[in-house]
Amino acid sequence: MRVLLIHGSGGNPRSAWASVRPLGDEFELVAPHRGGYPPSPPLERIDFEEQAEELAPLLAEGVHLVGHSYGGVIALLIAARHPQLVRSLTVSEPPAFALARGNEDAVRLVERLDSHFTSGPRDPRTFAVGFFELVGVSATLPDPLPPELEQSVRATMAERPPWEAQVPLDELASTPFPKLVVSGAHEPAFEAVCDVLQARLRAERAVLPGAGHNIPRAPGYVELLGDFLRG
């Protein structure tokens, strides 16, 4: 069974999905580099809508779709557009904050993120430090950043804000495949989004503390994902 793993911002599939490699003994793991992230050439603008279309051909004849963070937004869009090719959908903390419109925690986090992206530091390392702090990623960044990591950060800086995504919940709710939504109990804004997804999609819900926004590295994630895929 093929599992399509879509990585989030600030890294690459190798680092984002390192923890799930043991599942490769049982599943065919496909972890593409999103456009703009190395080794792909840099892009001036990255759009979740366009990347959903670019990655859709990897669905082949059926796939378990797994997305984290920005990749979770892309996974939601792919699943809604190509439901006949999706066996299951797993998303962890997608920053689709429009789903939690009116939630005070989501509003505050969007305001802080928008300020960081529009008027924050343009130096990649300084930007990354502030961005990781806002979303709940604990990371020690080398100084200076190696070229590959610098390009990854610049790709994040070029991304269309994910809170602009219009996730078609009604279409997704009508699909037959099972859904799993995972959060990390570190940021109320992400919990609010995941709660909406659980309710509207009738999804299974899991909370895995211990890794902040790095949900795939959280204790129990690999076991949870493996059991869900087998089920």
Image: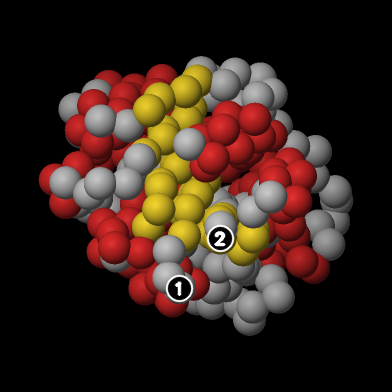
Q: Quadrant of residue 30?
A: bottom right
x and y, in percent, of residue 21 in the image: 74, 49
What amino acid is at disc 1?
Ala
**Circles 2, 1 touching at the beta carbon (< 8 Å):** yes
> Viewed as shown, does residue 143 lie left or right of 106?
right
Q: Which residue is mark 1?
A: 60
Instruction: Tell me the kind of residue under disc 2.
Output: Arg
Looking at the image, which residue is at 76% across and 44% down? 22
**Tag shown at residue 74:** none
The answer to which image quadrant residue 225 occupies is top right
As displayed, is residue 64 above or below residue 54? above
Instruction: Name which residue lies at 64% across and 60% down.
Output: 28
Q: Secondary structure at mark 2?
A: strand
User: Which secondary structure, mark 1?
Assistant: loop
The residue identified by callout 2 is: 2
Question: Looking at the picture, does residue 9 appear above or below residue 100?
Answer: below
Query: Residue drawn at (20%, 33%), measured in percent from left and top?
Result: 200
- Which residue corresponds to the image point at 43% horizontal and 70% vertical from the top-left? 61
